[in-house]
Image: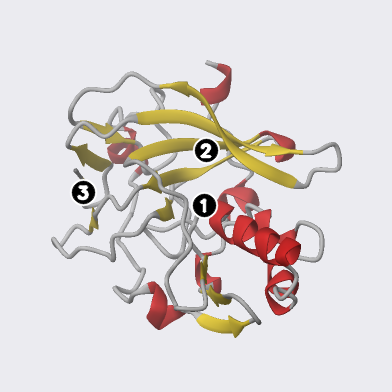
């Protein structure tokens, strides 16, 4: 299984990686609650996912990147999450935050927020909420570890979710789950991670990773309505 970034073109997905449509579920006040799979998207063993945001056959590439002159050079550094992140220590858990990976999915802002819950994690309920909020972060910006330093993670099977954000009436990025390797156009692999978000609108300044530019662009690709 691998996602290879083609030069100024699509993501080339190989290894029969399952593809899903999903959404950020929210409560009546717009607070993010969960990541929900809506349906499976039929895909062959190998397929190309749109990276420029202009395909008429989303999420699959239809060659529109050539028509629009898409420039998709990767700009994200090949550093690990540990190298990018800042540590916040609490009584029972440690919280690692790589802020540059934020995609504004808003799971960390529930209640007291993930940082405060970590600081107050001597209370079991606060610890539980800190772990929940960190593990729901689809970009992997937030990683939480137990007292031994072992990451507390949801056990995701390898798959890709085409993520929608209906409460904001926008489309989000591709949620890549389960440690699928992402390789740049020069053949250099990024750190394989359990959770990461790669750009789908074409506008990220931290390619291949999402940086929430889709919200600035008002990106809506219509997949959820098809």
Q: Is residue 148 above or below residue 206?
A: below
Q: Position of residue 79 (x, y in %)?
A: 32, 76
User: To which quarter of the image does residue 41 belong?
Assistant: top left
Q: Is residue 6 above or below residue 84?
A: above
For marks 2 and 1, the one nearer the N-term is 1
User: What secondary structure is marked by label 3?
Assistant: loop
Q: Can you tell which mark lies on residue 21?
A: none
Q: Are marks 1 and 3 in contact (CB under 8 Å)?
A: no
Q: Is residue 101 above or below residue 25?
A: below
Q: Position of residue 54 (x, y in %)?
A: 43, 35
Q: Is residue 22 above or below residue 147?
A: above
Q: How many numbered marks are there?
A: 3
The residue sitting at 22% across, 22% down in the picture is: 44
- What residue sits right under mark 1 in the picture? 138
Residue reaching furthest to the left: 187
Q: Position of residue 166 (x, y in %)?
A: 68, 33
> Which mark's residue is nearer the viewer, 1 or 3?
1
Q: Is residue 200 visible?
A: no
Gap between marks 1 and 3, in whole Å? 23 Å
User: What secondary structure is marked by label 2?
Assistant: strand
User: What secondary structure is marked by label 1?
Assistant: loop
The residue sitting at 28% across, 22% down in the picture is: 43
Residue reaching furthest to the right: 29
The residue sitting at 19% across, 43% down in the picture is: 1
> Which mark's residue is nearer the viewer, 3 or 2?
2
Q: Residues within 10 Å of mark 1 (few under 14, many from 20)?
A: many
Q: Can you tell which mark lies on residue 6?
A: 3
- What residue sits right under mark 2 in the picture? 163
Tell which of 83 and 49 is nearer to you. 83
Gap between marks 2 and 1, in whole Å? 10 Å
For marks 3 and 2, the one nearer the N-term is 3
Q: Is residue 213 visible?
A: yes
């Amino acid at each position: 299984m691998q996602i290879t970034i083609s030069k100024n073109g699509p993501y080339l997905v190989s290894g029969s990686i399952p593809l899903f449509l999903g959404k950020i579920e929210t409560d009546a006040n717009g607070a993010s609650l969960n990541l929900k799979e809506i349906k499976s998207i039929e895909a062959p063993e190998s397929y190309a996912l749109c990276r420029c945001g202009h395909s008429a056959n989303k999420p699959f590439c239809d060659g529109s990147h050539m028509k629009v002159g898409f420039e998709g050079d990767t700009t994200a550094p090949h550093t690990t999450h540990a190298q990018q992140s800042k540590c916040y220590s609490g009584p029972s858990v440690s919280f690692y935050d790589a802020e540059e990976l934020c995609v504004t999915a808003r799971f960390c802002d529930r209640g007291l927020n993930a940082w405060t819950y970590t600081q107050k994690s001597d209370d079991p309920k606060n610890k539980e909420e800190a772990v929940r909020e960190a593990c729901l972060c689809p970009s992997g910006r937030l990683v939480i570890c137990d007292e031994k330093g072992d990451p507390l993670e949801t056990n995701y099977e390898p798959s890709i979710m085409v993520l929608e954000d209906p409460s904001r009436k926008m489309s989000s990025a591709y949620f890549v789950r389960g440690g699928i390797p992402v390789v740049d156009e020069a053949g250099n692999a990024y750190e394989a991670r359990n959770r990461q978000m790669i750009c789908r609108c074409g506008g990220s300044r931290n390619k291949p990773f999402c940086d929430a530019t889709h919200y600035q662009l008002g990106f809506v690709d219509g997949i959820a309505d098809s």
